[in-house]
Structures are given as structure tokens and as C-alpha cells.
Image (spheres, rainbow, N blue to C red):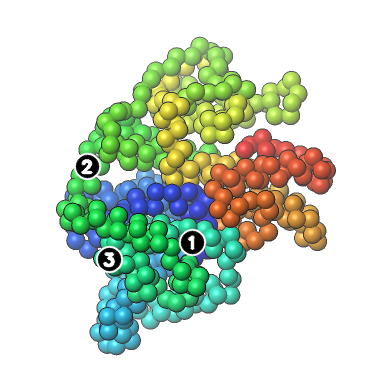
Amino acid sequence: MASPIVSSSFRNGGHFRLSDRASGTGDFFAGSFSLPRSKGAFPEILRMVNLRHHVAGLVTTPDSQSVCVVPRFEADYAYVATAFIESIRRGLAVCGLQSNSPKGRQIGSDLSTVLYQLASYTGLTRAPKDLDAHDRFCQAYDRHLRSNPPSTRIRRMAQEFAKGLIPFTAAKSGETVKGHIQRHLDNETAEYLFPSGEFPQELEEKRKEFRRIFMHQKTLPMIVKRSNDRQEIWLRSDVELLHEAYRATVGRPGPANDRLIGAILLNAIMTGRHSNEQLERRKIKLAAGETLIKQGEMLKEMYVVLSSTAPLAVEAQIDHTHDFQQLAILTAPHVLGIMGMWRGQPEASTIFTHASNTLDVIVINSDRFALLTQESGFQAAMADEVRRRLSLNATIVGKLLSELTINNEDSLLTSIEQLFRYLTGDSHTPLDRVIDLDLDASPVEYVDALRVQVAQAIKDKRFSPELEQCMANVIWYM
């Protein structure tokens, strides 16, 4: 298991609704072998995969047509394709076709060519060029994993993924959970995920439930039907507006509007399978100087601003004086009111217009927002927005925290440093010295833990004056 991929996916809420995620990945792989790649269902399936990956923060979008794996994930991302190849080769070996036999090597070579090419469709730019290069990369990465063992916390994250995914993939393969693990996982990985070979009975029950569903489905027709159903949703007026706004923001510096709007777009597509209810579109007219959102108020709805006739201004009273300072000028498309609703706290800033303004917005009311917060994609984008806000001071805060903890055995400060590094995007953080946080904690609870621990450290005067001011801003941004 690639620890950075595990911890990033967990931080982004990827352990929720794993069957949906596995189904999407399965459609992509099965469709790539069975469907035309340039027309029909497959381009739509690929668009969904890339949208999910972008919302999760694994790829960037240099433009509205392409994706690229985030550089720090490149080796880890390639290893995911490597692991797929090795899992198939291992399964064939169990059936009697040894990997190093002439036929086994030919199949391994074909698998490498096809699966690394598929990975390139989802943003991988560098990959092993042939089977020999694949074998060398696999061995090197395996050595890397063994020399940098994951912490107990990250191991627990991986186990949560396994509990959700393995019943699904075992059912797809027509195998029991135990047989599936023995056939496709090497002993080291199996022990890592299921210590002492103990497979909870609940996993087998989940597998049987999935199997009952799959027995009445034919794989390729179902893949095409799912894609065709989504194609109709893509044409819905509110979805088209969100898609246009998403494409307009990709690659734009600043707040994570592209990923936030992408998460809302993804949710609209997924919920559209069960409901035809469209998101509300509204025109909002503001006079010069009029406020749209006021610092300190509790919002009952948030907005995706599709267009505006003038920019909006953001100001806030950060240091508890009577002086407000302007923080930003916003141009559409943009997401407004999201942080206060997500935290369940009053708004941290005021948004108003200097000039007469007409806004065209998509409205997300409190009921729809509650559904959004249950979606892994939305949690991913919100976690990224928290990271972005933390990252406004990340360089100086990270440096000050490292200097403070390097020769300091203070467990609270060490925990704060690891949480801060993790939440600002360092997926290689071991998380082995985080305190007062359950191993089963959710991504949101990681954010809450940092907020609580920083507040405690400030109360106890454990920071230098400079770091205390920075960390006070951290709490404000969260």
C-alpha cells in the first residue's frame, strides 16, 4: 500500500462510499478493454474519473481539457498501476501460469503496455516503458515501502479502505473474501491489512450482498447504461451551468473554486441518478456598498456565483479591533459562504460590492448542503480549502514549528506540527506522534484536533510571540 496515496485519500474522505468509487474504477478498466475509446460511453467514463481525481486533489488541471498527476504523487500513482498489474500476474500464477514463463512474461508485457497507457489517460506522465522497467520499478518501490514503514495510524487508514473494497472486488470476481485475498494479495500485504489472517465475518456478508446484486447484471450493458444515464444528467440546465463554471475556474490561482465547484458538480450528477430536482438558480441585485454576507452571521445557504456585473470585495476584522481590513477582490465564478456552513459557525468575513452589481448564482440551501457534506468529493474539496487557507502561512509556520520542536520533547507541539504538515498537503507525514485523536478519526476530526490543540498551546503560552500570532491566524482561517 502506497502510504501517501492512502493518507491523501483518507484525508479527502475517500473511505466513504467505496462501492461507488470501486464501481467507477471498474467501469473505467472494463470499458477501456471493451468500448471505443474516442466516442460513446468511454469518454464520459474518463471524464468522471478525472473529475473525481481532481476533486480529490490527486491531479491538477492545467486547462479544461487535460489533467496531470500532482508531482509529489507521481511515483505513488504509478505504483497503483504497478500493483494492478502484479495482482493480475499473481492471480494467473495461482492458476498455474507462472510470471517468469515465456507466456507469463508476454502477458505481463501486454498488461504493462495497456495499464500504464490507461494511467496516462488519467494524468500519469512518466511510467515504466516495458516489462523489465516495470519489474525494476516494482522492486525499488517495494524496498522503499519496507524501509519506510507506515505508522499505526496510516495502517489503520489502509485497513479501512480494505474493509470497504475487498467485499466489492471479491463479489465481482466470484470468489469468497478469503479466497480473493489469497489469490490476489501477496502474504506481506495480506498480513498488513488483515493481521494473523483474520477476516471479519461481516466482510463475507457484504460480499454476499454485492454478489446478489451483481448476479442480475451484465457488466458491459450496465456500464453503458450508467454512462448513458449520466449523459442525460450532464445535459440538465443546472449541471451545464456548474460544468461551465468549473471549466472557467480550472487552473486559476487562489481559492480552490475549481475543486469546490467540481465537488458540487459531481454531487449533482451522482444524486441526479435518483432525483430530477434541480438546484435553484437566482438573480441577486446589490446596490453600491451593499453587503451580501456579513461577518458574524449564521448562513442558511451558500452560493456558486456564476457571473457578476462587478467584482465583490472581502473584508474582515481579524484582530478583534474595530479596524476591518480588505482581504480579497473576487471575480466569478466563485463559491461564497461555504466555510461558515461547513464549520457550523458564524461567517468569518464580510462580502460586499463597491459598485452596483447583479449576481447570477446557484443556491445551495441547508438541506442540500447537509447532503453535500456526506459526499467524499465535497469533503475532499473542503479539506483542500482548509489546507489552502492554512497554506497562506504554511512556509513561515512550518519553519517556526520545526525550529520549536526539533529539540523539544513537548508532545503537544510535536502533535501540532504533524497535524499542520498533514493538513497543508504533506502526505508523507508519518502521523505517529499525533495525540488525543482516535485511530478511526474522520478527516474533519483531524481539522478539529489541530484547532483544539493550537488553542490549548496558545492558552499555555507554549509558542513564541511570532508563532502565537501565526497560529492564532490558523485558528481564524479554520
Q: Earlier in the sequence, mark 1 or mark 3?
A: 1
What is the three-letter code of the residue carrying label 2?
Answer: Asp
Query: What is the spatial separation of the Cα atoms under label 1 and label 2, in whole angstroms?
Result: 33 Å
Locate residue 166: give its quadrant: bottom left
Within 10 angstroms of label 1, few (less than 14), some, or many (20 or more) residues? Answer: some
Q: How many C-alpha atoms fall within 10 Å of the one at disc 3: few (<14), some, or many (≥20)?
A: few
- Circle 2 packing at 10 Å, graded few (<14), some (14-19), many (20+), is few
Q: Please determine whether, in this image, residue 187 is positioned above or below residue 239.
A: below
User: The C terminus lies in which quarter of the figure?
Assistant: top right
The tag on residue 133 is none
Farthest residue toward the bottom?
101
* 283, 313: nearer the viewer: 283
Residue that carries the numbered disc 3 in the rendered image? 173
Residue 159 has which mark? 1
Residue 128 visible, this angle: no
- Cα distance, mark 2 to mark 3? 25 Å
Disc 1 marks a residue whose amino acid type is Gln
Instruction: Identify the residue at image location x=72%, y=22%.
Output: 323
Of 387 and 447, nearer the camera is 447
Residue 358 position, x and y percent, is: 43, 17
- Please report contact status of discs 2 and 3: CB closer than 8 Å, yes or no: no
Are discs 1 and 3 less than 8 Å apart at CB?
no
Q: Front-most of 63 and 370? A: 370
What residue sits right under mark 2 in the picture?
229
Of helix, strand and loop, which one carries label 2? helix
Q: Position of residue 353 (x, y in %)?
A: 54, 19
Secondary structure of the residue carrying numbered label 1? helix
In the image, what residue type sits under mark 3? Ser
- Between tags 2 and 3, which lies in front? 3
Which of the two marks, 1 or 2, is nearer to us in this view? 1
Q: Position of residue 97 (x, y in %)?
A: 27, 83
Sequence-earlier tag: 2 or 3:
3
